[in-house]
């Protein structure tokens, strides 16, 4: 489980990616509907922290 941040509205939300698919996983923002990728690279990552 990760806490990820939406690049459009900036809201944090939980995400549960499937094992091994973190870098390709797309997440739809539950607030504004924006779809964004969750990178495993910390510099590009939308992951705020692991839960
Ligand atoms: Zn959003």
Image (cartoon, rainbow, N blue to C red):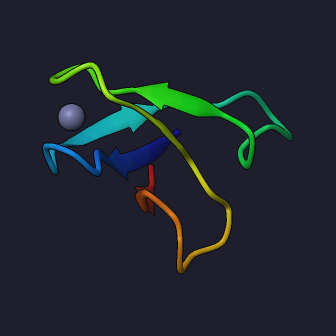
Q: Is residue 22 left or right of residue 7?
A: right
Residue 6 sits in which quadrant?
A: top left
State the residue lying farthest toward the right. Answer: 20
**Picture quarter containing residue 32?**
top left
Seen at 46% across and 32% down, the residue is: 15
* Residue drawn at (49%, 29%) of the image: 27
- In the rendered image, the vertical position of residue 51 relative to residue 18, given as above or below: below
Q: Residue at x 16, y 23 (%)?
A: 31
Judge by depth and name the residue closer to the eye, 49 or 4: 4
Question: At which x and y percent is residue 2?
Answer: 48, 46
Residue 31 position (above or below residue 49): above
Which residue does the image show at 74% across and 27% down from the upper left? 18
Q: Is residue 12 left or right of residue 45?
A: left
Number of marks? 0
Rendered-image quarter of ligand 1: top left
Q: Is residue 44 above or below residue 46?
A: below
Position in image of residue 47 (x %, y %): 45, 58
- Depth check: give the residue in front, 36 or 14: 36
Question: In the rendering, at what x and y percent does residue 41 appear?
Answer: 66, 71
Position of residue 26 relative to residue 5, above or below, is: above
Is residue 5 something one can see in this rendering? yes
Towards the viewer: 9 or 48:
9
Is residue 16 visible from the viewing direction of this image? no
Q: Is residue 14 left or right of residue 22?
A: left
Residue sitting at the far bottom: 43
């Amino acid at each position: 489980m990760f806490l990820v941040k939406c690049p459009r509205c900036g809201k944090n939300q939980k995400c549960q990616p499937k094992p091994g698919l973190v870098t390709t996983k797309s997440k739809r923002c539950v607030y504004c509907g924006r779809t964004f990728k969750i990178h495993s690279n910390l510099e590009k990552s939308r992951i705020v922290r692991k839960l």
